[in-house]
Image (cartoon, rainbow, N blue to C red):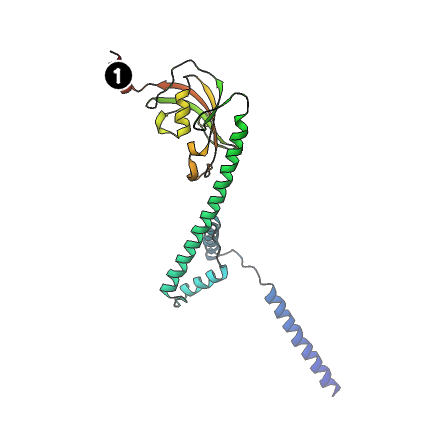
Amino acid sequence: MKLKLIAGIALGSLILAGCGEKKEEAAAPVEPTLETLEQKVSYIFGMNLGNQFKRDDIELDIDIMAMALRDAREGKDPRLTEEEMQQAMTQFQEKQRAAKAEAAKAIADANSKEGQDYLTANAGKEGVVTTESGLQYKVITEGSGPKPTPTDTVTVHYRGTLIDGTEFDSSYGRGEPTSFPVNAVIAGWTEALQLMPEGSKWELYIPAELAYGPGGTGGLIGPNATLIFEVELLKASQDKEGEEKKESKEG
């Protein structure tokens, strides 16, 4: 009798121990390895999707995505009707648009305030001139050549930065100046260039409304960004047609 009891207790202990081991294994699953080609390619596809979702700021349920992948791979019927899918996607897209619009507005408002504060403080600095439009400039070197007209083509060297000093463009960095018509650039440039004698080097402080406004450029220049440019007017090439008309009138 005692032997049977001891054997029963021992068997029960083994069963309980086995259950405990199974629970412990379930709580700590073995992480899959990346050894086979299929495993590596699966990981690559997953990383690409994950990076895209992160870049687009999309929050999704990874477990549900895995379930949908298995359903599709195994040829199961979709768990949502076509109408339910379309409705859910429409709601999701509207939610994403609203979130992006709210985030963009917050950035635009912050940039606008920072720009206004900067220009207000800058206006009181020595050598800074503020025009009627709100453009600010400071003469670093005053040239003695002609001033460009709106239809003239100018050749300049320039460096553009945000008010925090972040550089977003530079002809100096590219190693060569650039040429363009005076009336083919942002309003702040068009105004400033017509005030600059050829050979001048100025620093421009351009409010957002004379630059890229609430749209920005989609890159480093955000919505309502105030911009700073160092501009060196190397050459002002007069518009030949305009000069001919001018000479004809004078004659």
In the rendered image, the quadrant that contains the N terminus is: bottom right
Image position of 170 with respect to 236: above or below: below
Residue to which mark 1 is pinned: 244
> In this orientation, does residue 216 appear?
no
Spot occupied by residue 63 in the image (x, y as percentages of width and height): 50, 61
Disc 1: CA contacts within 10 A as few (<14), some (14-19) or many (>=20): few
Q: Amino acid at mark 1?
A: Glu
**Residue sitting at 49 percent across and 42 percent down?**
107
Helix, strand or loop for disc 1: helix
Spot occupied by residue 85 in the image (x, y as percentages of width and height): 39, 62
Spot occupied by residue 90 in the image (x, y as percentages of width and height): 39, 57
Task: Name the residue at the front extreme.
Answer: 132
Image position of 39 with respect to 192: above or below: below
> In this orientation, does residue 234 appear?
yes
Spot occupied by residue 152 in the image (x, y as percentages of width and height): 33, 22
In the rendered image, the quadrant that contains the C terminus is: top left
**Residue sitting at 43 percent across and 23 percent down?**
157
